[in-house]
Amino acid sequence: MFAARRRQAGVFKGSVMDWSKTPENLKPDNLYAAVSFDAVNRVFRDNRLFDSSIYDTTIGLFIGPTILAMEGKPHRAHRNLVSAAFKSRSLLRWEPEIVRPVCHTLIDEVAEAGTADLISDFTFEFPTRVIARLLGLPEEDLPWFRARAVELISYTVKWKRAFEASAALKDYFLQQIDIRRSRPTEDIIGDLVTAEIDGEKLSDEAIYSFLRLLLPAGLETTYRSSGNLLFLLLSHPEQFRALQADRTLIPAAIEEGLRYETPLTTVQRCATEDTELQGVPIPAGSVIDVCIGSANRDESRWVRAEEFDIFRQRAPHITFAAGEHTCMGLHLARMETRVALECLLDRLADITLRTEEDPHIWGQPFRSPRRLPVTFRTVT
């Protein structure tokens, strides 16, 4: 669909999203879609003409006010405060202390069986456990936390249940905030509680709203992107063998996976005034589908764009957006995926996809395999 649209124009009037279940009074009057790399890049980088206010009436209803929908000075100030939780020295500590042990524990749980579903047994589990550890949540709270996280993430399916999960997470995070005010901790919640720039601190609402934002941002996209990469490698065995023989190919494989099968294909922006995009007039108030997945397959930017190739000449993709709203968790996401892949390669050999069960990547706007059944041999 995206390829057909790109052949016609980089921008078109209409949508790539399914609005059939949206009440008529909530549907935008004007819908447009940006599908070429240049169009998507321009929308992301011009936040004056194309802002994120639409999130106030979508996911913002469930997670509260966050940097997702902020623009300009408020966005920069808020981002500077919350980015304290993702400083580079924290990443250096998180990898050996949290991320790698979590991956090894999950592999331990399936190693003797010789078979596993890498989605339910690994890629869905590891970012959930990592986020819980990064937040400093008690181990015994993990099942409850995971259940509420999934309910919140699924707000488009059951909105009432998502509101209830949002309220429960607010109460839970407020308790965690109070604990850290009396006893500081070295975790993300502790960093957010003590974060201060020019004498300004984050309010409780800003903290628990940001923590709720971490659930779709840190769980949904990471588990999908890592599952996509594993499927692509296992279904391109010659490239997988090359990577097994040369671990220096891992970063390139991660970037190609993010480009070729973008876990979140489409986000949205609003036009703040009458403007134009690649020659197409866009009236003020229009909602624009920003098709990242399409931009990442743009033939004018990548030769053989519709092929997965970890050896291709690199050109930066736009999976983590661009401009002011570039994903602040991109370094954590890349590190988590790299460590997950390294641990699997260290511990398991002869990993083979069970194709008789027809595993495949599907979905829009979120894309990933539902199942990834494999057989393997444990490395002794």
Image (spheres, rainbow, N blue to C red):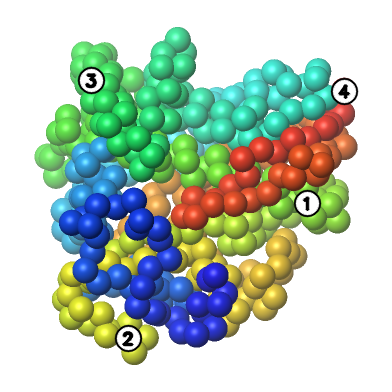
In the rendered image, residue 236, in percent from the top left (x then y), is placed at 80, 55
Q: Amino acid at mark 4?
A: Thr
Q: CA distance from mark 1 to mark 2?
A: 40 Å
Give the residue at x 38% y 39%. Answer: 157
Circles 1 and 2: CB distance less than 8 Å?
A: no
The quadrant of the rendering that contains the N terminus is bottom right
Quarter holding residue 32 = bottom left
In the rendered image, residue 151, in percent from the top left (x then y), is placed at 38, 30
Which structural element holds mark 3? helix
Q: Is residue 51 above or below residue 46?
A: above
Q: Amino acid at mark 2?
A: Val
Circles 2 and 4: CB distance less than 8 Å?
A: no
> Which sits earlier in the primary sequence, circle 2 or circle 3?
3
Label 2 Cα neighbours within 10 Å, binned few <14 / some 14-19 / many ≥20: some
Q: Is residue 317 above or below residue 278?
A: above
Q: Is residue 331 above or below residue 312?
A: above
Question: Residue under circle 2?
Answer: 280
Quarter holding residue 273 = bottom left
Circles 4 and 1: CB distance less than 8 Å?
A: no
Q: CA distance from mark 3 to mark 1?
A: 44 Å
Question: Residue under circle 3?
Answer: 171
Q: Amino acid at mark 3?
A: Asp
Q: CA distance from mark 4 to mark 3?
A: 46 Å
Q: Is residue 176 left or right of residue 89?
A: left
Question: Residue under circle 1?
Answer: 235
